[in-house]
Each structure stands twice: as structure tokens, then as C-alpha cells.
Amino acid sequence: MTLSFEQARACVLREVSAGRGNLPTEKVASLEAAGRVLAEEITADRDYPPFPRSARDGFAVRAADVPGELQVIGEVRAGEVFRGSVGPKRAVEIMTGAPLPEGADAVAMLEHTERSGDRVKIARALKPGENFNAQGTEAKQGSVVLSPGRRLGFAEIALLAMVGRECVSAYRRPRVAILPTGDEIVEAGHQPESFQIRNSNAWSMSVQVARAGGIPQILPIARDNYESTRGLVEQGLEHDLLLLSGGVSAGKYDIVERVLADVGAKFFFDRVLLQPGQPLVFGTAGGKFFFGLPGNPASTMVTFEVFARAAVELLAGANEAPLPLLQAKLSKEVRHKMGLTRFLPARVSADGSTVAPEPWQGSGDVYSLARANAFLVVEPDRESWAAGDMIRVLLK
């Protein structure tokens, strides 16, 4: 079955979301949980901030007393508490992060004051609540601060520390089998013959899998014969997801689809109106999802990013797996033959405002992919874009 890019991606999201079942979880030290997907609800153990907290260096006052000249009766720093109370015409010098003294309802910023001895002149009017954070304005005790399905980054790890969670429940990272195929493939450390190429696809997919939240497992190269391919496919289906590279075109020795059919595979699609990456296979066998990715490096990288990455993220526990497409202004004209959605190597400027296509020699040109930091997303129903036009971009 041949699908458009949008149809194929929707199919992957729908089938993996519906078929992943109850994902396994495990306890993880919070400091080691970066990149993992949270499997439990995290609540605030107390109000945050737990006290009215000054947002400025200055003087804690009663708003009704300013503008005016006040008597300074003390100071309070972060980590301390002022034991007295701020009465009429009184002020307490306060530092950022310190608790607001009892009786005060505003903070006059230091740069708006003039101090002489124990007197301070405040020329500006203040409103109650100005320049401090009231207790519980960030989160109330018992409120949910993180929900299951959230990928944990540096801010989320900081939040876990803030609420005192040294350990959390996270979804287990899916084990992803990577199966390169082809008699022309040799391992990266081998000296290839003139008619051979090194196994770069397995390495790129391994990085992509890990970046998506999975645990990559590179299998031996499946040779272009039925027995080798079937044995390694069966081994790969023991993992949570199987990624095959190569062998899904229409050539005489492209036998991957036949092997998959013989192990009971159900195919959702076997071709996508996409370049690079038309001969893309997606299905399920033995309760496990698989992708048959085209063997050319650009095809493998692109089809992983726009299809298989979403499957890894969902199997890792994410609630959704959006494709992070941006808009940038073209610095050069782009033309193409309509009918296919194309992902072309490109470079986005340092400030992210412009993008230019990167010269490349087709889907086997790994060097151009290494130079690129993005892909132009060229729509199938439009023939050309002029310099200055906005176009969709997928960052690498």
C-alpha cells in the first residue's frame, strides 16, 4: 500500500499508540533520569514558594507608607527570618530570596531608594504585592507539578529536586534491534573492496535511537539470502522494535518483505510518496512493530527521523511524538518535480532566520548530510520557492 507522507506518519502514530499496551516501568534515580519518560504523577510536597519571597534587593515596607521617609529597623537575607514586624513608617532592608517580614506588603527596589543611617527615602509609590512572590503562587501543596508521559529534561530534574524526589518511576527504555542487510556491506573497521561500502547506517540509527529514548542493539549484517535474513529477523523481533536497513526495494535480491511475510507480518504500508525514502515498510509481527527502511544513508536517516523516531518515543512512554517542524526564510531558490514530499539537506543560519539548500549528490551522499544541520521540507503540490519565501524546516 502506498501512502502520502502525512498518511504514513498518521498511520505510525495511530498504530503504535494503540498497540503498545501497558508499557513496563522501573524505579530510576532522579539524577540519572534525564531523557527518560515519567511514569508517575509528581505532586508538590509543600507550597512553592513556601513563604512570601522577595523578588528584589531593597526594603520591605507597607505600601501605604510610600512615597515617604521611613526608619530602617533591621535587615533580612535569604536563609534568614526577620523576627520582628514592620509597623507604620518602618522598613526592613531585604535581599532577593529572603522571606518578607510580617506586616510588610511590598518591596521597594534598592535603586529607587536613598539611605542615610537608619533612614531611607522612597520616592516611588508601591502597590500591595509588588516585588515579591506570595506563598504558593508557583505551586500549592499537593498540586500536580509533573504528569506521566513527560520527558524529563534539566528543568524537570530540577523540579524533582525541589520537591524532594530522589527517585522516580519511569517507563523502561525500549530495546531497539538494528538489522543492516546486504552483501555489499562490511563493518566500519574493515577495509572494503571497491564494490563494498561500510556499515554507516547501523551507526547513524544507533545514535538516532538513543536520542529518541531507546536502547540500540546492532545485530550482525544479514546477507542477501533467505536463511540469514530470516534468522536475524526472528532475533530482532525479540526486541521491542525492529529496524531493518536495506532490502525493501523491488530488486531481485531484496527479500526482506518476503521474510517478514513468512514470519506472519501484517503490513500497514510498503511505500510512501517521499524522497528520499519511498520504499519504506511498516508493520507488526509477533506483537512487535518493525520498519523496513531504505538502504541509502539519506533515506535511512530521513525515514527514521520522520517515522521511526515517533515509534521509539511512544514506546518509551511519551504521550505524543510531534514532528518539530519550523519555518525559515529561503536564501536561495528551490525547484523540484511535484508529486513527492522531499526532505533535502540544508543549513539553517546561526540565528535561525534563514535556510539554504545544501549541495548534494543524492541519497548516498553522507558527506552532504554531515554538512547539513537541517532538512528542507518541500511540499508535493508546489513546484518552486523563491529566495525570501518561507519554507518548513526539520532540524537535525
Image (cartoon, rainbow, N blue to C red):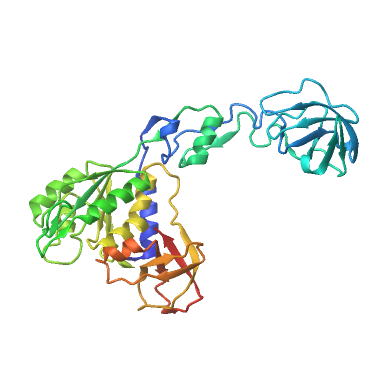
Question: With respect to residue 130, does 245 lie above or below?
Answer: below
Residue at (10, 65) in percent of width and height: 194
Question: With respect to residue 127, does 271 lie above or below?
Answer: below
Image quarter hosting the C terminus: bottom left
Taking the image as drawn, is residue 239 in sight? yes
State left or right for residue 208 relative to residue 160.
left
Q: Position of residue 325 (x, y in %)?
A: 46, 60
Residue furthest front as drawn: 117
Taking the image as drawn, is residue 15 in sight? no
Number of numbered discs present? 0
Question: With respect to residue 365, does 99 lie above or below?
Answer: above
Between residue 290 and residue 300, name the one nearer to us.
300
Residue furthest top as drawn: 83
Q: Where is residue 339 in the image (x, y as percent from the top left)?
A: 35, 75
Residue at (39, 52) in percent of width and height: 14
Which image quarter: residue 2? bottom left
Which image quarter: residue 335? bottom left
Q: Position of residue 239 (x, y in %)?
A: 25, 42
State left or right for residue 237 relative to residue 34.
left
State left or right for residue 22 relative to residue 269.
right
Between residue 377 and residue 360, name the one nearer to us.
360
Residue at (75, 40) in percent of width and height: 131
Between residue 15 and residue 130, name the one nearer to us.
130
Residue at (80, 36) in percent of width and height: 106
Between residue 329 and residue 58, name the one nearer to us.
58
